[in-house]
């Protein structure tokens, strides 16, 4: 698994407190920056992006061909909407401890009581 572009530096700083692990694909000065993640680090960074900081979206693409030109979106998630990544987040161990917030409104509408939940 890898992270590319400006997000590679952010992930590197979070995991390693440094950008030394970021490498450039292509030409050294103008190439695409990237960092490779091990399978064990993936749920940790997912937890940080989708649960803890709650201000990032994550998309996971897989290559479906040997030529490397057939990338397909297989999972996507954002804060509060991480169903695609639920199994990966459970490996991080913090999903069960994540607080769930529910809003309930009681009211009177058209001659009866109404309950709304969000």
Image (cartoon, grey):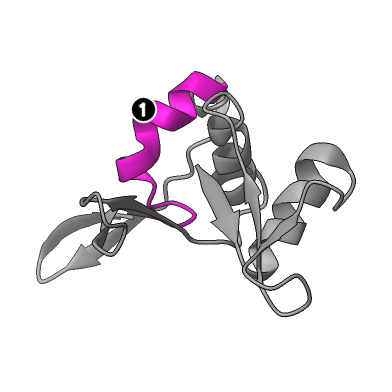
Main SS of the magenta part reads helix
**Where's residue 40, x and y in %?**
57, 23
Q: Quadrant of residue 61?
A: bottom left
- 112 to the left or right of 26: left
- 51 to the left or right of 103: right
Circle 1 packing at 10 Å, graded few (<14), some (14-19), many (20+), is few
Residue found 47% across the figure and 31% down from its top: 89
Helix or strand or loop: what does disc 1 sit on?
helix
Extreme residue toward the left, this view: 111
Which residue carries the number 1 mark?
87
* Quarter of the image that includes the C terminus: bottom left
**Label total for image:** 1
- 10 to the left or right of 106: right
The range drawn in magenta is 77-92
**Where's residue 110, x and y in %?**
10, 71
**Where's residue 55, x and y in %?**
61, 62
Question: Is residue 59 magenta-colored?
Answer: no
**Where's residue 112, x and y in %?**
12, 59
20, above or below 29, in the image: above
The one of 4 and 78 positioned closer to us in this rendering: 4
Extreme residue toward the bottom, this view: 30
Q: Quadrant of residue 31?
A: bottom right
The one of 116 and 18 positioned closer to us in this rendering: 18
Question: Is residue 78 magenta-colored?
Answer: yes
Residue found 48% across the figure and 44% down from its top: 101
Residue found 89% across the figure and 43% down from its top: 17
């Amino acid at each position: 698994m890898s992270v590319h572009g400006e997000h590679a530096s952010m992930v590197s700083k979070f995991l390693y407190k440094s950008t030394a692990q970021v490498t450039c694909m292509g030409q050294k000065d103008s190439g695409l920056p990237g960092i490779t993640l091990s399978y064990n680090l993936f749920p940790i960074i997912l937890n940080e992006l989708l649960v803890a900081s709650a201000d990032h979206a994550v998309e996971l693409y897989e290559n479906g061909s040997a030529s490397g030109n057939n990338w397909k979106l297989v999972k996507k998630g954002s804060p509060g909407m991480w169903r695609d990544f639920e199994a990966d987040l459970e490996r991080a161990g913090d999903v069960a401890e994540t607080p769930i917030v529910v809003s309930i409104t009681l009211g009177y509408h058209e001659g009866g009581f109404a309950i709304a939940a969000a």
